[in-house]
Image (cartoon, rainbow, N blue to C red):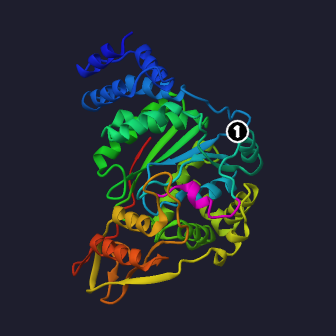
């Protein structure tokens, strides 16, 4: 079959067959089909879309382009959690140890941060010595031993996605539901878990800016997961403002540790409980989400969740003394308050701008080659709906460069809206797709 004919077929809005989709993905992964032809196909898909059968075939072809992990030797229902990204998203650091302490195997592959979104692997590497590149054998052994392991993605896991995403990124075809679904779900299905819980973030700091597009993506991913015989659910969570108070690697790790000790921000814990209760129900340990949430609350109350976190860091090679004493994390040289110029109520703290301000300080990457400054970031003092007095801090900038801090302050002020009118706190759980 000729690639020219397949491009023409999709350009005209016709369906690509299973055989044709596999031919395209296999040929591109092997370097037999050039970038310029795949670029043309991506643009045709962008405008004409794919039906649910095509999406499934695309996802499975991408999954089959590389290794598929065999986790069958892990006892119990293996569960992975995936977030579509956000600002201040340290959910995995809190959720994973809670779920593992209850006895549910958490076998998670995570990524690094890019742009205004943070990465779980970067945050875990705040612990000196933490090994984020476990072999498949060590990954399985650790989950069987302590019920949790978090590792970076294998280079051989869905390699078609890596090539396709790089091309989508430079051809303005990233934001198409079929292509997003294939990208996310091919990696999740290749990771070999029995169940997947998706955190689909919605709003200013998220990839999906509105509920309608987020719901479409969630339904698409859940459909693919079910077709692949996985237990799967998606929780839509609000990302119009940063999650929790801390944005920045060390700062978020400290907030996560405090959350495991029972001092977590309300919005962070609401998301953790919503995702975790679904994970526990999938595991079969509990059938009722309300009862599952009580198990999570008890794990925090009795200290078992925090103890599991310390054990997890130690077993995976990290210096667990940092988890026991957060004062060991090196602070930024300067902590600068950003004070409100007027009294009123906080109506907006735009998440994307806060994430970009943190990145500008050195807390994130513009390219994958950038080195992160682990100590910098932003700690909010107020959330949307809170009352604030003139001269009271909106947030605190943690910086090692005063010039960068000055620019970050300007970004923060532009991202913040204060009004004399009262407003509600943001609703965190927007919808659930099962």
Q: Nearer the viewer, residue 70 or 247?
A: 247
* Residue 222 visible within the image: no
Is the residue 53 above or below the residue 157 in the image?
above
Within the image, what quadrant is residue 261 found in? bottom right
Side of 147 relative to 428 (left or right): right
Disc tally is 1
Residue 259 in the image: state x and y as whole percent. 57, 69
Q: Residue at x 46, y 29 (%)?
A: 59
Q: Nearer the viewer, residue 154 or 220?
A: 154
Residue reaching furthest to the top: 1
Within 10 Å of disc 1 (Cα), the crowding (few <14, some 14-19, many 20+) is some
Residue 168 in the image: state x and y as whole percent. 36, 37
Q: SS at mark 1?
A: helix
Residue 401 in the image: state x and y as whole percent. 46, 77
Does residue 119 belong to the magenta stretch?
yes
Within the image, what quadrant is residue 357 found in? bottom left
Residue 356 in the image: state x and y as whole percent. 38, 63
Is the residue 421 above or below the residue 154 in the image?
below
Magenta segment range? 118-129
Residue reaching furthest to the bottom: 391
* Residue 282 visible within the image: yes
Does residue 259 belong to the magenta stretch?
no
Within the image, what quadrant is residue 322 found in? bottom right
Which residue is label 1 attached to? 136
Q: Residue at x 62, y 60 (%)?
A: 125
Q: Residue at x 73, y 39 (%)?
A: 75
């Amino acid at each position: 079959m000729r690639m020219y004919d397949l491009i023409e077929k999709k350009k005209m809005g016709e369906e690509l067959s299973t055989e044709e989709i596999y031919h395209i993905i296999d040929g591109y992964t092997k370097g037999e089909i050039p970038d310029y032809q795949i670029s043309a196909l991506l643009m045709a898909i962008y405008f004409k879309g794919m039906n649910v059968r095509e999406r499934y075939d695309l996802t499975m072809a991408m999954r089959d382009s590389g290794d598929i992990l065999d986790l069958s030797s892990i006892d119990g229902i293996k569960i992975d959690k995936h977030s579509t990204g956000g600002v201040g998203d340290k959910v995995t650091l809190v959720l994973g140890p809670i779920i593992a302490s209850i006895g549910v195997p958490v076998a998670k592959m995570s990524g690094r941060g890019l742009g205004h979104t943070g990465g779980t692997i970067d945050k875990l590497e705040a612990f000196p010595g933490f090994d984020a590149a476990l072999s498949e054998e060590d990954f399985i052994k650790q989950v069987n031993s302590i019920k949790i392991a978090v590792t970076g993605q294998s280079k051989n896991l869905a390699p078609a996605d890596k090539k396709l995403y790089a091309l989508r990124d430079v051809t303005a075809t990233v934001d198409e539901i079929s292509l997003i679904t294939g990208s996310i779900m091919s990696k999740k299905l290749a990771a070999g878990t029995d169940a997947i819980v998706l955190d689909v973030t919605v709003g200013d700091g998220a990839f999906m800016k509105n509920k309608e597009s987020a719901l479409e993506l969630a339904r698409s991913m859940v459909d693919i997961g079910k077709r692949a015989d996985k237990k799967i659910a998606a929780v839509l969570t609000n990302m119009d403002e940063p999650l929790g108070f801390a944005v920045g690697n060390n700062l978020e790790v400290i907030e996560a540790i405090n959350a495991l000790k029972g001092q977590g921000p309300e919005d962070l814990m609401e998301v953790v409980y919503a995702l975790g209760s679904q994970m526990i129900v999938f595991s079969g340990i509990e059938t009722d989400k309300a009862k599952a949430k009580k198990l999570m609350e008890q794990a925090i109350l009795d200290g078992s969740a925090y103890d599991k976190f310390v054990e997890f860091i130690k077993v995976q090679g990290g210096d667990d003394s940092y988890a026991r004493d957060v004062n060991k994390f090196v602070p930024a040289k300067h902590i600068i308050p950003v004070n409100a110029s007027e009294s009123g109520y906080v109506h907006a703290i735009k998440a994307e701008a806060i994430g970009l301000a943190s990145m500008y300080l050195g807390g994130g990457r513009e390219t994958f080659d950038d080195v992160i400054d682990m100590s910098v970031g932003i700690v909010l003092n107020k959330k949307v709906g809170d009352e604030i007095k003139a001269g009271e801090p909106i947030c605190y900038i943690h910086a090692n460069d005063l010039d960068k801090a000055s620019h970050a302050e300007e970004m923060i002020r532009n991202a913040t809206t204060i009004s004399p009118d009262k407003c509600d706190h943001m609703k965190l759980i927007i919808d659930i797709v099962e």
